[in-house]
Image (spheres, rainbow, N blue to C red):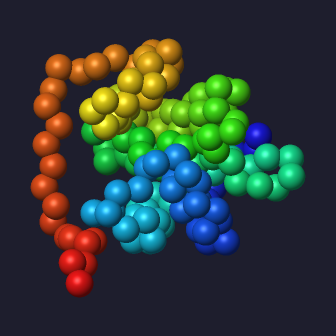
Amino acid sequence: MNIRAYRPEDQAAVISLWQACGLLRPWNDPYLDIERKLTVQPELFLVGIDAEDSLIGSVMAGYDGHRGWVNYLAVTPDRRRSSLGRQLVHAAEAELTKRGCPKLNLQVRFGNDAALAFYQSLGYVQDDVVSLGKRLISDFDPK
């Protein structure tokens, strides 16, 4: 797999990948998520491309000067358990480390035991914290 920065022509394939992986939620517009990421550290939005030039993975990372974050880690379902997710995480970690990032955080949806086991196999541990969120801009139009 070749890992490179996201390009605008990847949009449809990335959103299709996220859909296939069950990452999309009604309250998050994937088009807006991509648009927003491209305004902040776009070089940390990485995609994995196979030998046939097909998009097979993604990871979105960021660093705010205190902590790094990973979002939208995805690998096509038919290629899971082949180290592609591991490669994408390591690429994101390497980019964050280059920027001096001391710690990486990520969130896993409650009940996603497979994702928890995957991250634990990479050395991630559960922090003793409660994750809170507050929506400042709604992406959901109830029309």
Q: In this view, does 21 lie above or below 116?
A: below
Q: Is residue 101 above or below residue 8?
A: above
Front-most of residues 130 and 109: 109
Q: Is residue 113 above or below residue 51?
A: above
- Residue furthest right as drawn: 52
Residue at 16% x, 61% y is 135
Residue 99, percent from left and from top: 46, 41
Q: Is residue 7 visible?
A: no
Residue 78, percent from left and from top: 69, 39
Report which quarter residue 123 is drawn in: top left
- Quadrant location of the C terminus in the rendered image: bottom left
How many marks do you count on the picture? Answer: 0
Residue 33, percent from left and from top: 40, 64
Residue 97, percent from left and from top: 49, 33
Left or right of residue 100: residue 143: left
- Quadrant location of the N terminus in the rendered image: top right
- Residue furthest bottom as drawn: 143
Q: Is residue 135 visible?
A: yes
Residue at 20% x, 70% y is 137
Residue at 28% x, 19% y is 126
Residue at 63% x, 51% y is 47
Front-most of residues 107 and 21: 21
Front-most of residues 111 and 4: 111
